Amino acid sequence: MQWNSHTSVRRATVTVRALDRAQVIEVDGDLDVIGGHDLRQAFSAALRTSTGDVALDLSSVTAVDDLGAASLEWCSAQAIEARRILTWTACSQPLVRDLRARSASPSRHPGSDERHRQADQDRQRHVERRRERPAVRLVRSPDLEV
């Protein structure tokens, strides 16, 4: 853990260790723009260097801001894309409190609700198109006699 002497903010320390078949990423301190960047770097490295699952130990997180929360969402998206299992092995009370406050408060970004609605509609259209198209298309060849 490192302290920033100018703002008295506790900077996050991100460490990675191997445990059985999983990479464990431990975050200690504030999960802000710097901690979020360090988390993304460690998470990317864990995905590159291992084929196993990834676990986030967030038991020592002292606070999380919007950029830190976005980094956690980014990790989830990257795990899904890489077809890996991501688990949160522990969450600190300050982290839980901050994430709950964020989910209960209205979005601070103008137009984000509209973007979420648009993304949901796009996903729904994609699902409907997938249902319309058969997964396997059979083509009868003129050379084959049945």
Image: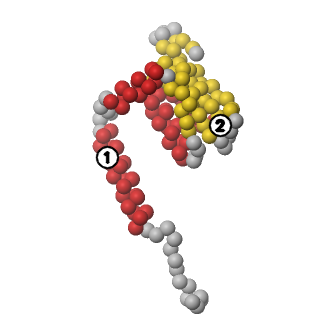
Name above or below for residue 42 compared with residue 124. Answer: above
Image point (48%, 14%), residue name? 9
Q: Where is residue 54 drawn, in percent x and y?
A: 60, 37
How many numbered marks does the figure carry? Answer: 2
Q: Which residue is identified by label 2?
A: 22
The answer for how far apart the CA atoms under marks 2 and 1 are is 35 Å
Q: Is residue 115 left or right of residue 43?
A: left
Q: Which residue is mark 1?
A: 117
Going by the image, does 6 lie left or right of 84?
left
The structure residue drawn at horizontal position 40% and vertical position 67%, both measured from the top left corner, is: 132
Q: In this rendering, is residue 3 above or below 65?
A: above
Answer yes or no: is residue 35 visible. Answer: no
Of the two numbered discs 2 and 1 in the rendering, the one whose residue sits closer to the viewer: 2
Looking at the rendered structure, the kind of residue marked 1 is Arg
Q: Is residue 78 above or below residue 90?
A: below
Q: Quadrant of residue 98?
A: top left
Residue type at tag 2: Ala
- The quadrant in which residue 15 appears is top right
Percent position of residue 38, x then y: 56, 27
Residue 30 in percent (x, y) is at 50, 20
Q: Which mark is residue 57?
A: none
Callout 1: few (<14), some (14-19), or many (20+) C-alpha neighbours within 10 Å? few
